[in-house]
């Protein structure tokens, strides 16, 4: 059985855990929500890199075989430095560091990041206009800007920061009047531009998709990249030789075997987890 470490600036990464658990139901999970330091969206890259290093080292110490950076903002700011520090077994300093952290189990750790799903949106739009909702940090990241550059000739790409979205999800306020008014403010400008496909470029946002659907005309597509990230994770695990569990004959578990950890309020994390996986 593999141990998959997942972290986010807060609760949003649970949308990624959900997609991973859908295809890897028998692995063990370590989930870390950095809610005390959330949001990352308006922090400097150095600050985010520092948090990501601390969290990743903790996950490796706790037995993670691979780590999913379930946060678009953290991916934009820190995945390159994480890979440089922990992923190349050809670098003697990396080997030494990871062997020490993992108690000799691994000489490197791979990191899987998030990427706004611009490609499927650009290929699927009928109006020729797509909307991207993300944090300011993600929208100015070079990864996003490169991807955007590749598709700008095919369609018009409108962007908006989901202002206040992360805070709503951290409070567990996924619907209701206040959620609708916050969501409307960032979603409406994209709809006004004629976007028929909206990319959810922050892992918190899928938890607000029902509110978005309520406010948008019928037929607007919302794209969450988490299922694609989950498939990519499986490929990298195979390449890394990380043994996947065979499962057991009693069928798949209904809830992931996960250790939930938070630098903030552990109750908020548990509540959202229980909303996704209600206890019977
Ligand atoms: N879930 C994070 C992301 O995907 C939230 C960003 C934040 O903390 O501002 O970008």
Image (tube, rainbow, N blue to C red):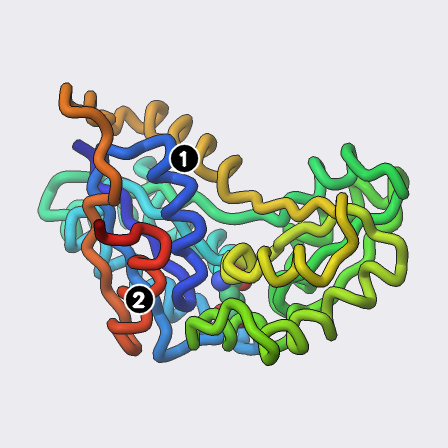
| Percent of width and height locating residue 8 | 40, 61
Q: Is mark 1 within 8 Å of ligand 1?
A: no
Who is closer to the viewer here, 242 or 84?
A: 242
Whether residue 73 is visible to the viewer of this picture, yes or no, is no
| Percent of width and height locating residue 173 | 48, 73
Label 1, secondary structure: give it: helix
170 relative to 121, above or below: below
64 relative to 270, above or below: above
| Percent of width and height locating residue 83 | 41, 48
User: On the rendered structure, is 3 left or right of 69?
Assistant: left
**Within 10 angstroms of label 1, few (less than 14), some, or many (20 or more) residues?**
many
Who is closer to the viewer here, 116 or 107?
A: 116
Which of discs 2 and 1 lies nearer the camera? The answer is 2
Label 2, secondary structure: give it: helix
Q: List the residue tagged with mark 2.
A: 271
Q: Residue furthest left?
A: 103
Mark 2 and mark 1: Cα distance apart in space: 26 Å
**Looking at the image, is mark 2 or mark 1 earlier in the sequence?**
1
Who is closer to the viewer here, 136 or 188?
A: 188
User: On the rendered structure, is 162 left or right of 21?
Assistant: right
Residue drawn at point x = 24 percent, y = 41 percent: 65
Q: Quadrant of the N terminus?
A: top left
Q: Is mark 2 within 8 Å of ligand 1?
A: no
Corner quadrant of residue 241: top left
Whether residue 153 is visible to the viewer of this picture, yes or no, is yes
Q: List the residue tagged with mark 1.
A: 233
User: On the rendered structure, is 205 left or right of 67?
Assistant: right
């Amino acid at each position: 059985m593999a141990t998959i470490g997942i972290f986010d600036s807060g609760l949003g990464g649970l949308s990624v855990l959900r997609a991973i658990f859908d295809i890897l139901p028998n692995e063990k999970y370590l989930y870390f929500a950095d809610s005390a330091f959330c949001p990352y969206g308006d922090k400097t890259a150095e600050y985010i890199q520092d948090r990501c290093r601390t969290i990743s080292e903790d996950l490796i110490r706790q037995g993670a075989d691979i780590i999913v950076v379930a946060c678009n903002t953290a991916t934009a700011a820190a995945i390159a430095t994480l890979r440089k520090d922990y992923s190349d077994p050809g670098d003697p300093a990396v080997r030494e560091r990871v062997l020490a952290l993992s108690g000799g189990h691994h000489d490197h750790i791979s990191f899987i990041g998030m990427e706004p799903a611009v490609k499927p949106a650009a290929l699927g739009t009928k109006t020729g206009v797509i909307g991207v909702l993300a944090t300011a940090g993600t929208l100015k990241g070079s990864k996003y800007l490169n991807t955007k550059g590749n598709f700008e000739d095919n369609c018009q790409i409108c962007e908006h920061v989901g202002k206040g979205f992360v805070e709503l999800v951290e409070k567990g306020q996924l619907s209701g009047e206040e959620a609708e008014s916050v969501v409307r403010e960032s979603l409406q400008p994209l709809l006004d531009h004629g976007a028929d496909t909206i990319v959810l470029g922050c892992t918190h946002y899928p938890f607000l998709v029902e509110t978005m659907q309520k406010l948008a005309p019928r037929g607007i597509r919302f794209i969450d990249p988490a299922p694609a990230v989950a498939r990519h994770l499986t490929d990298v695990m195979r390449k890394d030789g990380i043994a996947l569990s065979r499962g057991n004959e009693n069928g798949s578990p209904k809830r992931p075997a996960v250790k939930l950890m938070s630098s903030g309020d552990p109750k908020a994390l548990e509540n959202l987890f229980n909303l996704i996986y209600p206890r019977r």
